[in-house]
Amino acid sequence: MTAFVRTPEQLNETHEKLTIIQGNVVDYAVVENVIKNQDAVLSVLGVSKPLKKDPVVVEGIRNIIKAMEKENVKRFIYLSLLGVGGGSDADFMTKNIISRIVGNEIADHEEKESLINSSLLSFTIVRPPKLNNGLKKGLCRSGEAIKATSILPTMSRADVAYFLLKQLSTKTFLRKTVRIMY
């Protein structure tokens, strides 16, 4: 298992089977080299400045997709955001509050999701609510059109990570976008 990170000292995990590689997703050669010989890619790219547009992460997804297609690595799990894709069926929170607060991040995610949807990859796009540092419960609702049950839904990073990892061994949401919530 390989973790490709911008700032290794912020990764507080160690494991005998974990290799940590520092790099930047805009450096295509490094991205391609890291993707070589992998079975799947799980992207949880974060923006460098919250609430601002960040073309670096969009370019990073473009590089990841290009490298995966070149190296014939098909499985891609992408962490997006609940407010993305807020069409006419979006719930009140998505339409009226979340999109106003994180509109720039939503726009970036929409662009990245468009790139992913246009790819040849076996992707799953996962849209969780606001993340918190709570403990893992191991249970959540998931589906393409589930609605929030609270005004400000949140979910623990641990449960989101658990769900993302489960997607590596299931085809339930293959080439689909799924919302997850408690």
Image: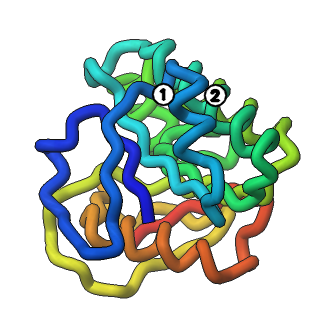
Residue 133 shows in the view: yes
Q: Quadrant of residue 61?
A: top right
156 vs 77, left or right, is left
Secondary structure found at label 2: helix
Above or below: residue 90 compared with residue 32: below
Percent x, y of residue 15: 24, 73
Percent x, y of residue 43: 50, 48
Above or below: residue 14 compared with residue 162: above
Residue at x-position 77% and y-position 67%: 174
Residue at x-position 48% and y-position 28%: 25
Percent x, y of residue 35: 60, 47
Number of numbered labels in the structure image: 2
Question: Which of the image's four quarters has the C terminus?
Answer: bottom left
Three-letter code for the amino acid on which mark 1 is drawn: Val
Sequence-first disc among 2 and 1: 1
Residue at x-position 68% and y-position 63%: 144
Residue 43 is marked as none
Residue at x-position 50% and y-position 13%: 55
Q: How is the image coloured?
A: rainbow
Residue placed under numbered mark 1 in the picture: 25
Residue placed under numbered mark 2 in the picture: 63
Assess whether mark 1 and mark 2 are in contact (beta carbons under 8 angstroms).
Answer: yes
Q: Residues within 10 Å of mark 2 (few under 14, many from 20)?
A: many
